[in-house]
Image: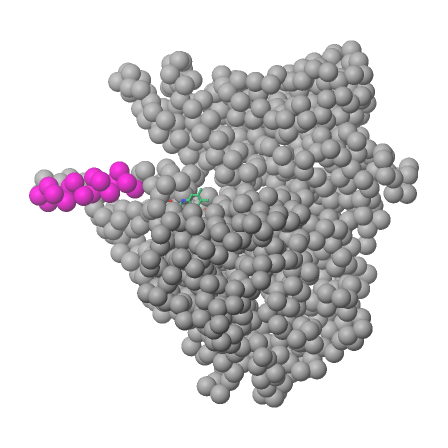
Amino acid sequence: MNSSEIQIFFASESGNAEAVALDINKELSRIGIKSTVNEINKFLKNEYNKKTFAIFIISTYGEGEPPSNSVLCFRKLARRSKQALKSAEIPESAQNDSASSDYKHLHFCVLGLGDTNYSRFCNASKSFIGYLDSLGATGFYEHAFADDGLGLEHVIEPWTSKLFEKIHSFIEPLPASSSLENPSTPHQMGQNEQHSANHVELPSWNVNRKYSSSTNRSLFIDYSKLGKVDKLTGLPKLPKLSIALNIIPDSNPIDPTTLNSNGFPNSFQYPKWLFTSGSVDSNSSLNTNDLSSNDPNLDKVFLSRISSSECITAQDATKRTLLLDLDISEPNQNSSISFSNFIGNSRASNLWEAGDSFGIVAPNDPSQVSAILSRLGIDRNLWHLKISISIPSNSPAPSHLAQFVRLPSSPSSPSSHLSNENYSELQTPQNNLLVGENSLGNLPTLFELFLYKLDISSFPKKQILRSMADFCSDVADKSKLLLICSKNGLPIFNNLRESTSIVSLLDILNTFKSCKIPIDALVELLPPLVPRSYSISSSPITNKNSWKFAFNIVEHYLNSDFDKPSFNVPPQNTGTDAQQPANVTSDNFNINDIQNLSAELCDIAISTIPKKYGVCSSWIDSLCNYPQAPKAIKPIDYLQSHSLINKNSLLSALNSSNSDNNSSLEISTNTSNAINTQSHQYIPIFYRKSATLFRLVNPSSSGNLIGTRTNSSLDESDLYQRPIVMISSGTGITPFIGFLEQLANEQLGSEKKLNRSVHMYFGCRNKHLDFIFADKLGFFLKNTILSSLNVCFSRPHLHTTVSTASDCNAFDNAAMHNSSDLNAISSSASSKLVAEVDEKYKYVQDLLDRDAEKLTDLVLVQKARIFVCGNAIGMGKDVNSRLAEILLSSSKVSVSYKIEMLKLLDIETSVENLEKDLTIIDANKALMKLASASRYNRDLW
Ligand SMILES: Cc1cc2nc3c(=O)[nH]c(=O)nc-3n(C[C@H](O)[C@H](O)[C@H](O)COP(=O)(O)O)c2cc1C
């Protein structure tokens, strides 16, 4: 067979399926096979009249439903499939159009993502397979279903590696010159990388975090709630373990006196292998619609300098939000690991746009790593030695560890189940020979492996708990762990997993003290530490070498049921041999012991309740030396005197915080304007462009932004006239600040005034505490870049008496109306805050309801583009259903809106159709239509 293109489609709610699809696409392009990746709705657009191969990655949501952005595709296929099944019952001669052969040219396979803790496991992907089967498509590779409860990677990794073999067997790769890398050779370092690996002294970071999560938390779990359990059911299969860690003696001698009491140095240098791996783990993404998509440099990790940092929420705010500015041009004088060095100076600045995002490769908290290694009894002398990984020749390495695999383990190699006492055996002379001096820089130390590569802070997957049970010497510990990961223990498992105080591996190890899981088993079972993604809140217009971004410091309070009574409970001594794992099976399991034990634990006193911190946000926070948070945020009229006259006036307004600070570079502790511009801290980041571009101008869809019925009389420039509706809450506002900069700049560049309206809907808790970017929004409003600013506060009473130059009434009215109101009302402002905005409107959804008619007109008549950014489960979902309800109810009261809805839905506007009632399903379908025309764009997390 000659070289065909593989089409990859994903249906994803929170990004897992998208990340897998992008990874497959990247790997296919690496091995020289042409592929494209798209949202599943695009699948319907293709014609399948010749042999085509498609891979579908589909997650399941709600109660067995497809992700919200794939509903359109699922509905259409379900309908066609129903027709096909019906027509199969009609004699062939009576059929004039057989739906059952719609997809006879299609060869496909499906990877479903789901979670067995929900009732209808992978239901969406299973339905999808049924639809395609009934429509004549044939499978070219086995379908698979990955369980998030156990760890998606246990299914995904073997499935994808066999998938590539399968594809290789029937598709010839493109000639080597057109492939990005030669698949048979290991990753070759480019010039810059070689430079970095051999000559560059990489910067270091200070390990002392401002806040450290508690390392001695032990959980109180009330098993008695489960009632009587006689026998365990539904235990997950014991995972087959295959990797072994090889410690390389003397590979990184370190003076023990330089280590602190936790066993790690006070600062860590970034390891060279972080920049030479060629790509980051998951979530790195390339867009196939874009010209630059096949650029292997795009997801390379590079260093950026934190050039300024500022706390943009007030002192009393519930959450702290930091605004950082990253210099992406020159990470440090010695290093060539920069964005422009990878991409080329001229391309670097043209590549990114407002709305793009990037990933941060953040390390775990070293104290947590230290606590885990100590808890597992690993000798401190081994922590900072280099290690390699060996695997049996026939098993694939977990992809995030593949770069460290050096030696296939032979039968004589140490077993992967070595107990911790046997670690000296890992230092085999063979390994020294195979891991040459030159490649040592590309290997991690044991500590680094845990620091950068393994997710130690999420709640452990069932397979880890299952394995941990096997390494418990105490019967009660073993029984409890087995119970938690069995079907009977599901309520406890879910309770632990969903706890807002985040139960981690270390918490489990501290709770089940007799568990001595070998470190290589743990390394194999722990999921990869995924880089954190952030939206860029600036545009290249202000500075093409700077990425601004705002994020919340994530803090979890340890106030769940688990943290109530017990800390440091001594393990139960049951008289079993401490070295022998307890012999509990599903048959001799005895719940009574456990229930008696939990009754005893209830009496133990409650200890002080500490907090847990987000991996990335708390790390970045520690690196920044920003002044104390201001007493009140910069108000909406803060930039009122700045007018948009020319580019300089725009830049001066946007950088107003910096200029405030320039007058007092000393770190100030109580001015609301102070920021720190003195940082010499560097962080590893990578450019990340999502497959569903969240940009003002979307190259893949330009020409069709105005509706699903393309109107050829509307040219490119007319697209800019379309109204824009931006909806966000909290830090979801960040990409919109970049959009507004871009719009302001366009306004300056255009001779006649653009007649496009731009509407912002934004929700936060409190106008004095966390109304971030209020000053900039005020500037855009005053200068008519924003036509309306609609803001609501969910906790308006958190802060009652603040004196500022701006009056709350003035703000409220201005925010709800337009810029001329702002001028009029602000001039009458008094200095005391008393009134609050209308408390009827707590969330952005309420504001959407208030403006239902205006929004319907904007969307259906004026063909506005909608952008939504923020939390997926809360805001994103509610905004989606509110918009659907608004479209539906407006079309019920107005014939002209109904006509527009029918047009949008591609339904003829006949009298008969106009008389039929539309349903909420139609309204959701209309939103999907808007989404596939890039008029409803969502960036949710
Ligand atoms: C609110 C919610 C509901 C879910 N419902 C189901 C379900 O009914 N069946 C299932 O198998 N998985 C369910 N899942 C699990 C997801 O399918 C799984 O976590 C998947 O990895 C998500 O992939 P995505 O990030 O691509 O959307 C649910 C997850 C969430 C958060």
Is 792 placed above or below 99 here?
A: above
**Where's residue 164, x and y in %?**
41, 66
The quarter of the displayed image where residue 479 is located? bottom left
Asked whether 839 or 284 is in front, the reply is 839
**Residue pictured at 74% horizontal, 54% vertical:** 209
Asked whether 917 or 432 is in front, the reply is 432
Is 148 placed above or below 885 here?
A: below
- If the image is split into quadrants, where does the C terminus sit? top right
**Where's residue 200, x and y in %?**
76, 68
**Magenta residue span:** 77-92
Asked whether 833 or 475 is in front, the reply is 475
Residue 41 appearing in the image: no
**Residue pictured at 71% horizontal, 30% vertical:** 769
How does the figure colour the protein chain or chains?
one colour
**Where's residue 454, x and y in %?**
58, 62
Residue 837 appearing in the image: yes
Based on the picture, tell me whether residue 89 belongs to the magenta stretch.
yes
Based on the picture, tell me whether residue 337 belongs to the magenta stretch.
no
**Where's residue 577, x and y in %?**
49, 76
Tell whether 189 sits left or right of 174. Answer: right
**Residue pictured at 54% horizontal, 40% vertical:** 940
**Exactly how many numbered labels are in the figure?**
0
Q: Main secondary structure of the magenta part?
A: helix
- If the image is split into quadrants, where does the N terminus sit? bottom left
